[in-house]
Amino acid sequence: MDYDQFRRKAIKKVSLGLGGLLLTPANLFANKNPLVKKLGVALVGLGNYSTKQLGPALQETELCYLAGIVTGTPEKAKTWADKYSIDSKNIFNYQNFDDIKNNPDIDIIYVVLPNFMHAEYTIRAAEAGKHVICEKPLAMNVVECERMLSACKKANVNFGVGYRLYYEPHHIEARRLGTNKVFGDIKLIESSLGFTRPSKDSWRLDAKKGGGAIMDLGIYAIQGARRTIGESPISVTAQAFNFDKEHFKGIYETVLWQFEFPNGIVANCSTTYSAYVDRLYVTCKKGWFGLSPAYNAVGTKGNTIQGDMSFKSKSYQQIDQLDDFAYAVLNDKKPKATGEEGLEDIRLIEKILKAVATGEKIKIAKH
C-alpha cells in the first residue's frame, strides 16, 4: 500500500468510526491523533526555498512536521523559532550539526543548501542516523551522488531527492497520458525551463558551487521528458551558448539538447538563464497534451486535444512530497522520488555536457 492508498483508507476508516463526521486532513492527522506517528523534520539551510515553500508546507503535512532547523545565522534562528514555535534544543548551526544524532525529535533531515554542499551534509546526516531528503540537483556530479547513496545504504536510512513534481497532479496526469499511450504513441516532446539570470554574486553562477542553468533548471526539463515517456534516453546531442560573457563565466548561459528515446521518440529540450520559458508539450499519433506553465512551484496548468486538465493542486507542491517520504520511512518502503532518481538525472546532465564539449552524439547506457 502506498501513501495515497493509505490516506484514502485512513480518512474512510476514521470518518466511519465517527458516524460520518466530516474531518479535514489537518484534523485527521493532527499530532494528538493516535492513529498516526508524525515524524520530525529538520531543515538544513533557511534560504528562499525553505522560507517560502518548505517551512509553510510542513504546517500542512499529515505524517511529518517541522521539528528543527540548522542555520548559521542567529537572526534567522530566532525568526524561525518565534514563527514556528521551535524548541531551542532543536536548533543547530553548522559547527554543532553532528550533535543532531542525539536528538530524538528529529527523524528526517532535509538538506536545502547550495548544490556544492549537498554531498557533505547528506553524508553527515546519514552518519547521524537520520533519514535524508536532499534538494535538487542531488549533487555536483555522479561521483558525489554515488557516495551519498552509499552512505545512506551503509547507515540503513531512507534517501530521497526533493522532486516536488513527482507528486503534482498535472505531472501525474501527463505521465499517465504518456506511459499509457492514451493518444497513441508519442512522437515528439518539447521540454523547456528558463528564468532571467540570477545576480552576479549568486552561487548559482559559480561552476564549482552551482553549475548554472543546466543544474538549476535543466534538470526539470530532463524530468519532464523521461517521466512522460516512462523510459530513459538512449542518446543525446547538445549545443550551448554564452552571449553575455561578463555575466556568465565558466558556465553556460543557454543549453539546448535533443534526447533520442527508444521507438524513435525525440525530445527537444532547453534551459536558459536569459529568458522565461516554462513548457512541456507532447505530440502523439492521435493527439497532443501539454503543461504551461509546467515546472513552476505554483500555478501549473495543462490541456489536451480533448480540453483542459482540471486538477486542484494543494497550496504547496511539497506537501505530498514530504508525506510520501515520511510514509516510506514509517513503512520501510522507498519514496517515489528516490536518491537513485536524482542520480539518473545527474548522469544525464553529464552526458549533455559531454555532447556540448565534443559536438558528437553521445550514447547513453542503461543503469
Image: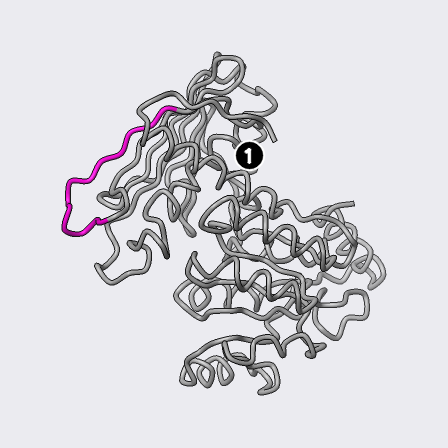
Q: Residues within 10 Å of mark 1 (few under 14, many from 20)?
A: some
- Tell me, yes or no, whether the highlighted magenta stretch contains residue 247: yes
**Residue 113: % across, % down:** 45, 63
Which SS type dominates the magenta stretch?
A: loop
Q: Looking at the rendering, in which quadrant would you find the C terminus? A: top right
- Quarter of image, res 221: top left
Q: Is residue 360 above or below residue 222?
A: above
In the image, is 231 to the left or to the right of 277? Answer: right
Return the residue nearer the eye: 318 or 101. Answer: 101
Chain part drawn in magenta: 237-249
Q: Residue at x 70, y 70 (%)?
A: 30
For mark 1, what is the residue?
173
| Residue 319, percent from left and from top | 57, 57
Q: Nearer the viewer, residue 56 or 107?
A: 107
Up the image or down, 17 lies above or below 153; here it is below
Above or below: residue 204 compared with residue 99: above
Q: Is residue 163 above or below residue 61?
A: above
